[in-house]
Image: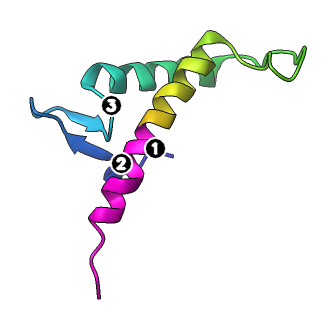
Amino acid sequence: MIKDDDYELDRFGNRVLIGLTAEETAEYFRLEEIISKSMPLPQVTRDEWYRPEDRRWLELYEKHESARRPFLKSSKTMH
């Protein structure tokens, strides 16, 4: 689930997901929309549960999460 603290401004002032470009952020949400409207694939084997859209969405999600974790850690306040 994407929250407000998952975003940052890029050098052009675009609101983007942390770690992604504006184009990747738009692609992420476009793919999420496609996936949410898709019917599940019948599972043929363990490795064939995904479509190309699923794989690309996961790549973007992992890129975002990898960048987000250290960003959020460094912005925490010590009490």
Q: Which residue is mark 3?
A: 20
The amino acid beneath tag 2 is: Asp
The amino acid beneath tag 1 is: Glu
Which numbered disc, 2 or 1, marks the residue that appears first in the sequence?
2
- Helix, strand or loop status at disc 2: helix
Q: Identify whether 76 is placed above or below 26.
A: below
- Helix, strand or loop status at disc 1: helix
The tag on residue 6 is 2
Residue 79 image-quadrant placement: bottom left
| Bounds of the magenta segment | 64-79
**Counting other residues with Cα less than 10 Å from the Cα at mark 1, is it few (<14), some (14-19), or many (20 or more)?**
some
The amino acid beneath tag 3 is: Leu
Where residue 28 appears, as percent x and y from the top left, is: 44, 25
The tag on residue 65 is 1
- Mark 2 vs mark 1: in front: 1
> What is the CA distance from the residue labelled 3 to the residue labelled 2?
11 Å
In the image, taking residue 50 as reference, residue 44 lies left or right, namely right
Where residue 34 appears, as percent x and y from the top left, is: 56, 17
